[in-house]
Amino acid sequence: MSKFSLAGKNVLITGAGTGIGRAIALEFARLGASVVVNYNSSKEAALEVVKEIEQIGGKAIAFQADVTQEEQVKSLVKASAEFGQGKIDVLVNNAGTLVQRCPIEEMDLSLWYKVMDINLTSTFLVCKHVIPVMKKQKSGRIINMSSMAAHNGGGPGAVAYATSKAAVATFTKGLAKELAPDILVNALAPGIITTRFHDQYTSPEVRAKFQAGIPLGREGKPEEVAGAAVLLATEYGSYITGEMIEVNGGIYMD
């Protein structure tokens, strides 16, 4: 069996109805994983992901939960463990968004909190309630979603988003130390990926400017982020923890 196999693994992916989360869900299913497709408002998209997984012979369920709300997270984790016959082998904290572009001087406290809750608090809450399951089974992989913005402060009006994603990166490193050696914790930092995120929040002019600065000469595909997630979730990632993998076509090099 290939070390890239996820056969017999149960995976929970937050925000898995669209974009990068969708791509990760489909790729993990192709490698044999059973997938819990979490969504908040994208019900039809999430059900379509489940349908696609079932069409390739995989197992999946869609589960609605606002992962900024602890009681809903508890229900999500309980259902995910039940789906995996008591196990959650891999958690991908993909839920997150910019919310809106807004300069700090114009940002009210409610918007600041909303950005932090969606991108950071959600990661904390899902980890908090998945960790006991992984500790009981004495194994697990956690993959958090940061961003290139964590390094460069983000584009115009994205300071809060960039700050939340930098916090996710630091949270990942601290949690990796806390949970070693049985549970591995890493992060992905996508650059400019072709998703509805940029369709919604980034103008064509700004996207063209970004693309001109990418050494590979194009935006990334969600499937290319999924490939990095595969590395971290499978046996080939068994000696990687506390790291953040950059998936950005070379636009940012640390």
Image (tube, grey):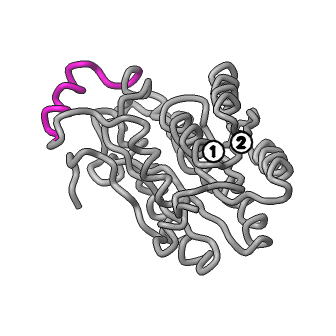
Residue at 71% over, 53% down? 10
Q: Is residue 69 left or right of residue 182?
A: right
Q: CA distance from mark 1 to mark 2?
A: 6 Å
Numbered disc 2: secondary structure = strand
Q: Is residue 17 left or right of residue 111?
A: right
Residue 171, can we see it? no
Q: Quadrant of the N terminus?
A: bottom right
Q: Residue 221, position in %: x, y?
A: 37, 35
Viewer-closest of 157 and 58: 58
Mark 1 residue type: Ile
Tell me which segment is drawn in magenta: 200-214
Q: Is the residue marked by circle 1 packed among few (<14), some (14-19), or many (20+) residues within 10 Å?
A: many
Q: Residue 128, position in %: x, y?
A: 70, 61
Residue 43, can we see it? yes
In the picture, the disc for residue 36 is 2
Prevailing secondary structure class for the magenta stretch in the rendered image: helix
Viewer-closest of 3 and 167: 3
Instruction: Decide which of tag 1 and tag 2 comes sooner along the chain.
Output: 1
Mark 2 residue type: Val
Q: Quadrant of the C terminus?
A: bottom left
Residue lying furthest front in this view?
1
Residue at 55% over, 29% down? 18
Viewer-closest of 37 and 158: 37
Write down the residue under mark 1. Answer: 13
Disc 1 vs disc 2: Cβ atoms closer than 8 Å? yes
Image vertical order of residue 66 relative to residue 119, above or below? above
Residue at 62% over, 22% down? 45
Numbered disc 1: secondary structure = strand
Q: Is the residue marked by circle 2 packed among few (<14), some (14-19), or many (20+) residues within 10 Å?
A: many
In the picture, the disc for residue 134 is none
Inspect the magenta stretch and tell me whether residue 202 lies in it: yes
